[in-house]
Image (cartoon, grey):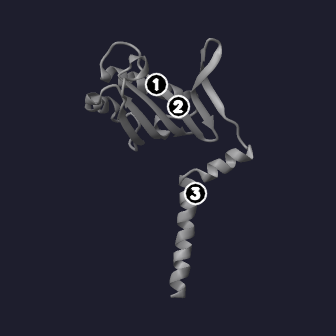
Amino acid sequence: MKDNNNGRRSLLKKLAASAAGAFGIGFLAKAESGSSEKEVGNITNHQEVPLFSGHTKHGNTVYVAGKGAHYKGSVTEHTKTVLDEIEKELKSAGSSMEKVLKVNVYLADLADYDEMNEAYRGRFGKKPPVRTTVAVYGGVPGNSLVEMDCIAYV
């Protein structure tokens, strides 16, 4: 019985260490230690005051702001434009589409889900990121049919 308890403790320690990494506890400790600073790229100003950044980079993690397509067109055209803009932003931050971990997709109309998926398919390589897709009540800002943001690593 005693050997079994040691095995469980060892397993629990391994699980706790994995959970700490998965939930970013190591990342938080690094951030609190001041060992790296937040970097921002492509700042958008509103009346000469910084409003938001196209991306924020901290350590080896890149957060890309929501990208939309603000012109008349189909959801397929909008999705391709949005993905192209995300790719440009990732490259400017030193990352790539293959390094994206999480994508959030915001649709103006859930009926566009299948069409958006067709344009989305394959853009992140053979190991696609996890994704959340929602329809936004009231529509996507700027009359885009789709908006996306993402988290990647460098």
Decide if residue 131 is in sight here. yes
Decide if residue 93 is in sight here. no
Tell me the distance, in whole angstroms, between the alpha carbons under discs 1 and 3.
Answer: 31 Å
The three-letter amino acid code for the residue at tag 2 is Val
**The residue tagged with tag 2: helix, strand or loop?**
strand
Q: Position of residue 99 (x, y in %)?
A: 49, 40
User: Which residue does the numbered mark 1 point to in the structure image?
Assistant: 67
Q: Judge whether 113 appears above or below 143 on screen.
A: below
Question: Quarter-wise, where is residue 20 in the image?
Answer: bottom right
Q: Are marks 2 and 1 in contact (CB under 8 Å)?
A: yes
Q: Position of residue 54 (x, y in %)?
A: 55, 25
Name the quadrant of the C terminus.
Answer: top right
Q: Earlier in the sequence, mark 1 or mark 3?
A: 3
The three-letter amino acid code for the residue at tag 1 is Lys
Q: Give the numbered dot on residue 143.
A: none
Q: Position of residue 5 (x, y in %)?
A: 53, 81
The three-letter amino acid code for the residue at tag 3 is Ala
User: Which residue does the numbered mark 3 point to in the structure image?
Assistant: 20
Residue at x 30%, y 19% (from the top left corner)? 74
**The residue tagged with tag 1: helix, strand or loop?**
strand
Tell me the distance, in whole angstroms, between the alpha carbons under discs 2 and 1.
Answer: 8 Å
User: Which residue does the numbered mark 2 point to in the structure image?
Assistant: 64
Residue at x 61%, y 25% (from the top left corner)? 41
65 lies left or right of 83 = right
123 lies left or right of 24 = left
Q: Earlier in the sequence, mark 3 or mark 2?
A: 3
